[in-house]
Image: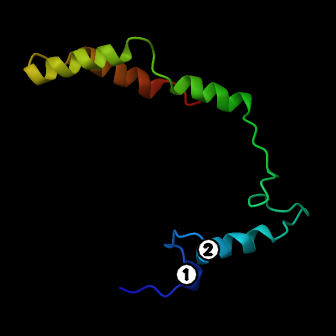
Amino acid sequence: MKVNDPNLAGAGQSRVGGAGVERSSQLDAISRPDGRRRGGVSGVPTDRVSLSALSARLQELRAEPPGHAARLEKLGGEVAAGRYQVDAVELSRRLVEASLRPKE
């Protein structure tokens, strides 16, 4: 299947001075709706990123608790050796508790 999209012209070129560089230069000359110019070739950044306290907290929550990797390693070894047994009563208790917990 052949795609004829004029917006993709030069997208695969990586040589200096190719169509991709020309397109980048064209984009640098475009003004934004708020009057700011796009940074880039001139080396003057015009955008700024700041992370909120919420994003910092989410990053903390994504981190694994201490000993998590060691526990997974141990369980993986037990499963591979055929020694891992599921406690059906404990599993069902936790499933019911999770389903009854109010949604946040």
Residue shown at 59% from the left, 80% from the top: 7
Q: Residues within 10 Å of mark 1 (few under 14, many from 20)?
A: few
Q: Residue at x 60, y 29 (%)?
A: 58
| Left or right of 41 in this view: 18 | left
Q: Which residue is mark 2?
A: 17
Q: CA distance from mark 1 to mark 2?
A: 14 Å
- In the rendered image of this protein, does residue 104 appear above or below residue 86? below
Asked which quadrant contains residue 93, the reply is: top left
For residue 28, above or below residue 76: below
Q: Is residue 90 left or right of residue 4?
A: left
Q: Which residue is most to the front?
A: 16
- In the picture of the structure, the residue carrying the numbered disc 1 is 9
User: Which image quadrant is residue 48 in?
Assistant: top right
Answer with left or right where residue 76 lies relative to residue 13: left
Foreground: disc 1 or disc 2: 2
Give the residue drawn at x 88%, y 60%: 36
At 22% from the left edge and 18% from the top edge, which residue is drawn? 75
